[in-house]
Image (cartoon, rainbow, N blue to C red):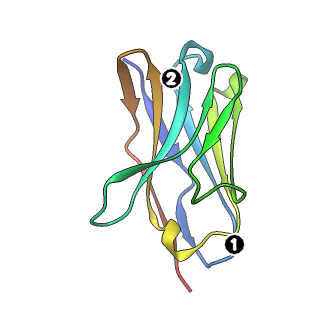
Amino acid sequence: QVQVVESGGGSVQPGESLKLSCVVSENIFDFNSISWYRQAPGKERDFVASINVNGITQYADSVKGRFTISRDGAKKTVYLQMDSVKAEDTAIYYCRANIPFRYYWGQGTQVTVSS
């Protein structure tokens, strides 16, 4: 059973930075892609960023230029570097490991941006 574990969340002020980690129990290159999603209170879970097996990255327009997704295969970890955070970035951040017709979700990590 694939396990996905997020960490690194916390409380920060607007304009600060935070780095989230997503550790996968299997070789991350066995997955088509690894993605980050977020869910704010009372809202749907939305796509944030992804990195595919070839290293190609994609970002939601709302985070483009501020967030960076990266990976370390040896550590089976995908990161989400969050810079210049805003109050609207407050959400639970989830990592998802993707293979055709199947997803593996983590439990999420809370990010709160408040002055």
At x 42%, y 15%, the residue is: 100
Q: Work out whether 22 lies above or below 16.
A: above
Q: Position of residue 88 (x, y in %)?
A: 49, 71
Q: Position of residue 115 (x, y in %)?
A: 56, 86
> Label 1 amino acid?
Glu
**Mark 2 closeness class: few <14, some 14–19, many ≥20 residues within 10 Å:** some
Sooner in the amino-acid sequence: mark 1 or mark 2:
1
6 or 55: which is nearer to us?
55
Q: Work out whether 94 lies above or below 42.
A: above
9 or 88: which is nearer to us?
88
At x 71%, y 26%, the residue is: 55
Image quadrant in which you'd find residue 73: top right
Secondary structure category for the residue under label 2: loop
Q: Where does label 2 land, which residue?
A: 25
At x 53%, y 65%, the residue is: 10
Task: Name the side, left or right, on which 45 lies relative to 76.
Answer: left
**Mark 1 closeness class: few <14, some 14–19, many ≥20 residues within 10 Å:** few
Residue found at the very far front of the displayed protein: 61
Q: Where does label 1 land, which residue?
A: 16
Image quadrant in which you'd find residue 101: top left
> Label 2 amino acid?
Ser
Q: Work out whether 40 lies above or below 20.
A: below
